[in-house]
Image (spheres, grey):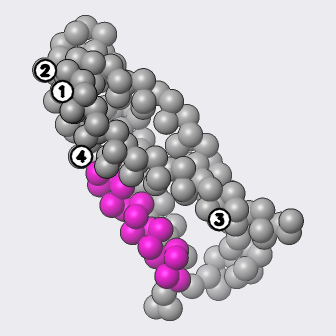
Amino acid sequence: MTAFALAYSLHVLAALIWVGGMFFAWMILRPAAIKALEGPARLKLWVEVFQRFFVWVWIAVAVLPISGVGLLQMRFNGFETAPRYVQIMMGLYIVMVALFIRIQSLQLPELRKAVEAQEWAAGAAVMGRIRRLVGCNLIVGLALVAIAAARPTF
């Protein structure tokens, strides 16, 4: 396997894990949890899901810029000659990381605290904020994947 193939594979896998995980949580797990579980059990489930998923998101957050810079160097000889779509992808990555850090550092501790105290209404309110942030991040992530796949020439 060439260095380019390795970097590209790691890059695609990291993006797939992050964006695919959000898609699964939003489109499959959330509706199923609403149908199958009562409010307190749903909140407990989400605390566990986030704890496990966010480990993988942090790995993606680390792998994407490392593999991305490697790809930039191997394919375009650096940032200066990279096409506009690559710059847009880098900007969208920063937006995604900012949204993720907001969830991880501000919303998730509040959700954990509410669940531990069995304050279900407060937990549901926090979960609503997390859901909206994840929805925004999913839209940004899907746009990023579409741009990467299309490789537009603008």
User: Quick check: marks 4 and 1 in contact, CB under 8 Å?
Assistant: no
User: Quick check: marks 1 and 2 in contact, CB under 8 Å?
Assistant: yes
Residue of label 2: 121
Q: Earlier in the sequence, mark 3 or mark 2?
A: 3
Residue of label 4: 132
SS at badge 4: helix
SS at badge 2: helix
Residue at the image point whose x is 37% and y is 43% from the top: 25
Q: Which of marks 1 and 3 is nearer the N terminus?
A: 3
Pinpoint residue 18: horizontal percent, then vertical percent: 50, 50
Q: Which amino acid does label 1 sit on?
A: Ala
- Residue bounds of the magenta highlight: 134-151
The image quarter in which residue 101 lies: top left
The image quarter in which residue 71 lies: bottom right
In the drawing, what numbered circle is on residue 124?
1
Between the C-alphas of marks 1 and 2, the distance is 5 Å
Pinpoint residue 139: horizontal percent, then vertical percent: 33, 61
